[in-house]
Image (cartoon, grey):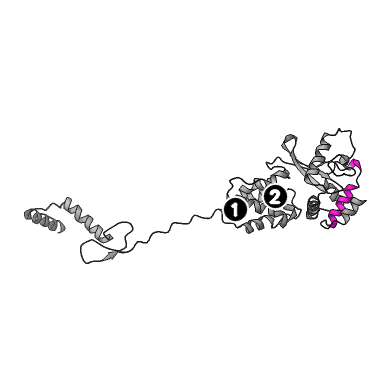
Amino acid sequence: MKAAHDVVRHPNLSSDAKVLIMYVQGLPESCASEALSDHAKRLGIKGRAYQRAKSQLKEAGYVHEWRRQGQGGLWMTDQLFSNVPLTDEEARRLRGAKAQAKPADRSPAGGQAGTRSVGGPQPEVEEEREKNTPHPPTEAPAAASSEPVAEADPEVVQAERVLLSLRHANPQLHLGVREARSLSGTAADWLRRGVKAAELRQALVNALPAEGVRSAYGFVRHRLVHKLPEAPAPIAPVATVRRPVTCEGDGPEHVFRPRADETLCGPCAQQAAEEAHFAKYPPRRQPWRERVATILEEDAAAH
């Protein structure tokens, strides 16, 4: 009764979470293979209410989950429920002890050294069977939380912090350390495209599905990929404005604004080019007799 009393008086558990874990703790052995979500449906706890309750129970240590890839490449979730809070290490040790036990051995593993007692039928159960996806297990090993990001870009480090902070904005988006790290590269693309960290967080937590988020990793990954903003258009280089210079051409002194290293303005450059052409290829002049004959022929033809 002490375990039930502790659940009822727990300050961080909602009424849905308390009802759910007390209901599970009182189930017979025949219900051991059912998922927590199935029990919640029987109690009328669905959607976001269920996700909140499960998240609170996980934070309090009453529920632990592990993701693994089974036959055919499908991802499955193993759940362990307990009537007392367990740390991650205690839950892993208990899970390992149950895996090594013989199939006929139904005795509770709570009496083993180094673990707290777990009452009644609280074995691991499989909750979800999803399509094969490349995401890692939900919970990373305890040592992973202290591993530094080696030689990571500043955007990647900042993106990982944003992803880990999503659990505080909405418990449905609770990501493990390894999950956040695997998504940090994709999230960093948002930051490289000018999106601020606060804007990225809002884009991920706003407008969640009404039926709740089934997989925090899958939901965040889908939103990061499919709602990635377009890359900003490249900024056209600003043309260098040169100072006016004095034209070196003939005629009155005047100035012009060169585009490069010209010393002549446009009109003077054109005149200089024509003069150079005629100097190299002078026009052929006709004798006066031939010029007169040509004029007379043209005049006669006109009449």
Badge 1: few (under 14), some or many (20 or more) residues near its Cα, within 10 Å? Answer: many
In magenta segment, residue 224: no
The residue furthest right is 1
**At x 84% / y 50%, what residue is drawn?**
40
**Which residue range is magenta in the image?**
11-30
Q: Position of residue 164 (x, y in %)?
A: 68, 52
In magenta segment, residue 28: yes
**At x 90% / y 54%, what residue is drawn?**
5
Q: Kindly tell me whether residue 227 is visible in this rendering.
A: no
Q: Position of residue 77 (x, y in %)?
A: 77, 42
Quadrant showing the C terminus:
bottom left
Residue type at the position of mark 1: Trp
| Magenta span main SS | helix
Q: Nearer the viewer, mark 1 or mark 2?
A: 1
Between 202 and 1, the residue placed more toward the observer is: 1
Residue 219, labelled with which disc?
Answer: 2
The local secondary structure at tag 2 comes to: helix
**At x 73% / y 35%, what residue is drawn?**
72
Between 284 and 88, the residue placed more toward the observer is: 88
Q: Quadrant of residue 266?
A: bottom left
Between 276 and 214, the residue placed more toward the observer is: 214
Residue 190, labelled with which disc?
Answer: 1
Q: Position of residue 265 (x, y in %)?
A: 27, 61
Residue type at the position of mark 2: Phe
Give the left or right position of residue 184, taking residue 295 as reference: right
